[in-house]
């Protein structure tokens, strides 16, 4: 959906920044509430970060347990665990199904208080490369994918090989016959090295020994477990089970001995990597599967950063320092599993309920 020119100013009740899974789940509930809202997305096509994942990536749970509110994800023919391509299709059809007012491509440059003042009942200005939206409430749903984290490590300036992050990885073909070091102890590292090890000489390093979950545990069990803990029921927490879901590709790689992790490296060298004990390894590439930080650059003018790269929020996900701002989809600090498909829907529901209540007090819904 297009939008106006750079000088255009449009008034709405709610502006949602980000059109990925969290943004459109938020849009679903705003539509149901009858709010006047817009979703602003910087990508040219629907699908959020799923359009950029590597080809072989699969969800940790079947389609029937990976849905946004209102419409169960249809299964992908021939696969129990849906691919990233299937998720993109689902998110695209979801937008169409609920006729969500998504404007793209629109880059949000900043969110600021109108006239620089924090006035009761005042609006927030969402300034973009395609115009400005004046909103009574802003819901930020930009996620983490656009802010990859690279650890600080000596030697990066002298390493002659390739350095990549998870966001740069598309598949194993570019690494065939090469020596590749994969850094990180989570699901991305395990899934990537599972397929890389079929075509390349791979070495896996992690800050601590990777912890594999029991083979019969996937996202269905994890979410049910966390839900019970959230209700105060006794039992193990998600973290007690491990960090890595044993999807079929990971199980196969583990069985052939490809998932033995070495301790964390100390530095890069011109020709590879080195450990604290002085041992070295030659490498053509280092792939950092070291996570992400919340993409919050657009919120800098509001001064809501808590000093640790997050925004302090209340139980309703509204920012403590700016109650006209809410946060959805950044991880457990914005609702349990809110960075997952099913978790995004659950936290979007409660967040929109709080925003709707505020609009009702203002006489807007």
Image: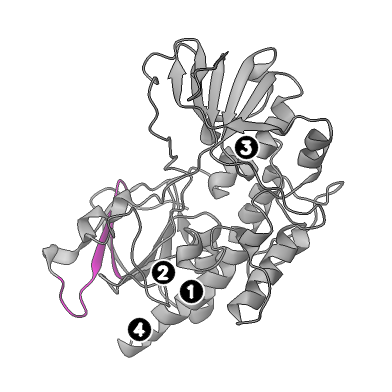
Q: CA distance from mark 3 to mark 2?
A: 38 Å
Residue stretch rendered in magenta on the structure? 118-136
- Closer to us: 132 or 309: 309
Q: Is residue 364 magenta?
A: no
x and y percentages locating residue 39 in the rendered image: 44, 60
Residue picked out by circle 3? 189
Q: CA distance from mark 3 to mark 4?
A: 42 Å
- Closer to us: 40 or 156: 156
- Closer to us: 263 or 299: 263
| Label 4 or label 2, whichever comes before in sequence order | 2
Residue extending furthest right?
78
Residue 54 against residue 358 in the figure, above or below? above
> How would you rate the neighbour count of disc 4 (Cα within 10 Å): few for under 14, some for 14-19, many for 20 or more?
some
Nearer to us: label 4 or label 2:
4
Residue 248 against residue 312 in the figure, above or below? above
> How would you rate the neighbour count of disc 1 (Cα within 10 Å): few for under 14, some for 14-19, many for 20 or more?
many
| Label 3 or label 4, whichever comes before in sequence order | 3
Residue picked out by circle 1? 30
In this picture, residue 193 sits left or right of residue 334 = right
Residue 278 against residue 315 in the figure, above or below? above
**Residue in the image at 46% along x and 76% along y:** 352
Residue 239's quadrant in the figure? bottom right
**Residue in the image at 46% along x and 53% along y:** 143
In this picture, residue 77 sits left or right of residue 181 = right
| Label 3 or label 1, whichever comes before in sequence order | 1
**In the image, which disc is placed on residue 37?**
2
Q: CA distance from mark 1 to mark 2?
A: 7 Å
Q: Is residue 131 visible?
A: no
Q: Which structural element holds mark 1?
A: helix
- Whether the residues at callouts 1 and 2 have beta carbons within 8 Å, the answer is yes
């Amino acid at each position: 959906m297009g939008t106006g020119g750079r000088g255009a100013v449009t008034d709405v009740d709610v502006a949602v920044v980000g059109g990925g899974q969290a943004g459109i789940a938020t849009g679903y509930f705003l539509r149901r509430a009858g709010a006047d809202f817009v979703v602003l997305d910087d990508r040219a096509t629907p699908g959020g970060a799923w359009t950029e994942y590597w080809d072989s990536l699969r969800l940790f749970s079947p389609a029937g347990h990976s849905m946004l509110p209102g419409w169960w994800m249809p299964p992908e023919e021939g696969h129990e665990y849906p691919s990233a391509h299937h998720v993109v299709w689902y998110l695209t059809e979801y937008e169409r199904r609920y006729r969500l007012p998504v404007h793209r491509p629109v880059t949000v440059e900043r969110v600021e208080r109108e006239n620089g003042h924090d006035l009761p009942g005042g609006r927030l200005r969402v300034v973009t490369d395609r115009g400005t939206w004046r909103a009574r409430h802003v819901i930020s749903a930009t996620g983490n994918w656009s802010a990859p984290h690279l650890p600080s490590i000596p030697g990066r300036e002298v390493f002659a090989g390739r350095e990549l992050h998870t966001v740069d990885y598309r598949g194993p073909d570019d690494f065939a016959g090469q020596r590749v070091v994969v850094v990180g102890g989570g699901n991305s590292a395990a899934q990537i090295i599972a397929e890389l090890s079929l075509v390349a000489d791979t070495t896996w390093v992690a800050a601590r020994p990777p912890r594999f979950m029991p083979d019969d545990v996937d996202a269905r069990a994890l979410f049910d477990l966390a839900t019970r803990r959230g209700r105060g029921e006794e039992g193990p927490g998600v973290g007690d089970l491990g960090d890595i879901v044993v999807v079929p590709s990971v199980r196969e790689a583990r069985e052939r001995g490809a998932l033995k992790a070495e301790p964390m490296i100390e530095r890069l060298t011109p020709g590879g990597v080195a450990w604290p004990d002085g041992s070295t390894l030659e490498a053509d590439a280092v792939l950092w599967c070291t996570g992400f930080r919340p993409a919050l650059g657009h919120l800098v003018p509001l001064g809501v950063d808590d000093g640790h790269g997050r925004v302090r929020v209340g139980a309703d996900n509204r920012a403590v320092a700016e109650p006209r701002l809410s946060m959805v989809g950044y991880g457990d600090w914005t609702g349990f599993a809110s960075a997952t498909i099913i978790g995004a829907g659950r936290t979007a529901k409660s967040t929109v309920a709080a925003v709707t209540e505020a609009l009702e007090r203002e006489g807007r819904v």
